[in-house]
Image (cartoon, grey):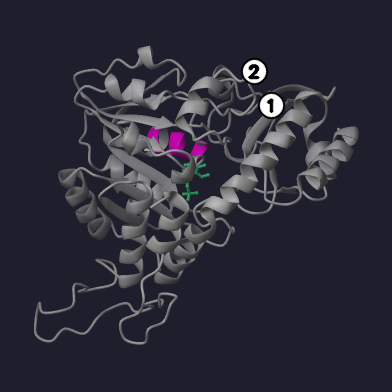
Amino acid sequence: MRFETKAVQAARETDPITGALVPPIHQSATFVQEEPGVHKGYPYGRTGNPTRALLERAIATLENGRYGLAFASGLAAEDAILHLLQPGDHVLCCDDVYGGTYRLFEQVRRRYGLEFSYFDTTDATAVKPQKNTKLIWLESPTNPLLKIADISAVAERKGNALLVVDNTFATPYLQRPLELGADIVVHSSTKYLSGHGDVIGGLIVTSNAEVYERLKFLQNAIGAVPGPFDCWLVLRGFKTLALRMKAHSENAQAVAEFLSKHRKVERVYYPGLPSHPGHAIAKRQMNGLYSGMLSFELKGNVKKFVQATKVFVLAENLGVIESLTTHPATMTHASIPPEERARRGIKDNLVRLSVGIENAQDLIEDLQQALEYA
Ligand SMILES: Cc1ncc(COP(=O)(O)O)c(C=O)c1O
């Protein structure tokens, strides 16, 4: 089956009791046992829930992996992965990641004895695992600079470490890291997977049985699990994922081309532009569509610009049907110290756009009028 069909089929299961086409939401904290330890696979709602189990099977199908696990947020999923490690272990991470990921690494997990270092996302030859390197962590495309990592080239250099890929920006419709040699895929399902901005959630997929068993244990032992209704909303999002990603990508391409010719725009970061340094790899790795995320450096006043848009809304999220603007330096990446932000190339005049599924011409006209105020 092709992706579009799989996405619709994986997210549904006819209810054996009522025949309901849309799966029920099993909004129950616990499940009745016939005798101690005898139940239908769900002893308690933190350990497992049928709606969550459907979501876990569905994301595994979409990523072409064997096992899925759902968490209360993208960061909860990331933290569960870090719990695979022990004090003294090292994580080799690409140099452009979501600010919250950086904060989790540097301000939380470093205090528990994990070591982190960073390499140039765009240079797979810079991946040189140390003896104690247990994880190699990639985002591609990255947040907020849309850098592209060559996932298979990094996989070739991973040695004994596990390769984790945050696939939030691309989604499995555009990119499937497990097929490129990754061991673990992680998502913020808050974004494109649910797609409508009404859920906070995280997902993990792996085909490694040992890693899965440990993560499943951690999911229950730590307890950062999503509620059944949130799982159901993500499942509903899967059914339209392909359609939405096409629309997001086409709109973002049009917006990127418009911005790259505008006199008030210094530089546009979008992998769909042939001038983008990662374009050739993205073209091969991402199915020829480049998602709805782009950033640009503004020649003008950022505050005036973000306040002047009428269709684009200033908000700290991405991957939802509405178009959003974000100022990484003061919003999504504020937890990275200013000197470190500057070193990574996240300038104060950088604006990030999450391009929605509205009419492309309306989006361009909105940006055009707002740029006049900037
Ligand atoms: C690439 C990426 N990964 C992970 C996260 C964290 O996800 P959540 O906000 O669901 O915890 C985000 C959030 O913006 C993100 O952009």
34 relative to 147 in the view: left or right: left
Q: Main secondary structure of the magenta part?
A: helix
Quadrant location of residue 82?
Answer: top left
Q: Is residue 318 visible?
A: no
- Which quarter of the rendering shows the C terminus? top right
Q: Residue at x 40, y 70 (%)?
A: 228
Seen as rendered, the residue at the extreme top is 125
Please provide the residue range marked out in magenta: 99-105
SS under mark 1: loop
- Given residues 214 and 9, the one toward you in this image is 9
Disc 2: which residue = 275
Q: Position of residue 92 (x, y in %)?
A: 33, 24
In this rendering, the answer to whether 286 lies above or below 59 is above
Tell me if residue 100 is in the magenta stretch.
yes
189 relative to 273 in the view: left or right: left
Disc 1: which residue = 348
Q: Residue at x 54, y 58 (%)?
A: 240
Q: Position of residue 139 (x, y in %)?
A: 44, 33
In this rendering, the answer to whether 97 lies above or below 46 is above
- Crowding near the residue tagged with mark 1, few <14, some 14–19, many ≥20 C-alpha atoms within 10 Å: some
Contact check, label 2 and label 1, Cβ < 8 Å: no
- Given residues 19 and 45, the one toward you in this image is 19
- Crowding near the residue tagged with mark 2, few <14, some 14–19, many ≥20 C-alpha atoms within 10 Å: few
Q: Is residue 85 visible?
A: yes
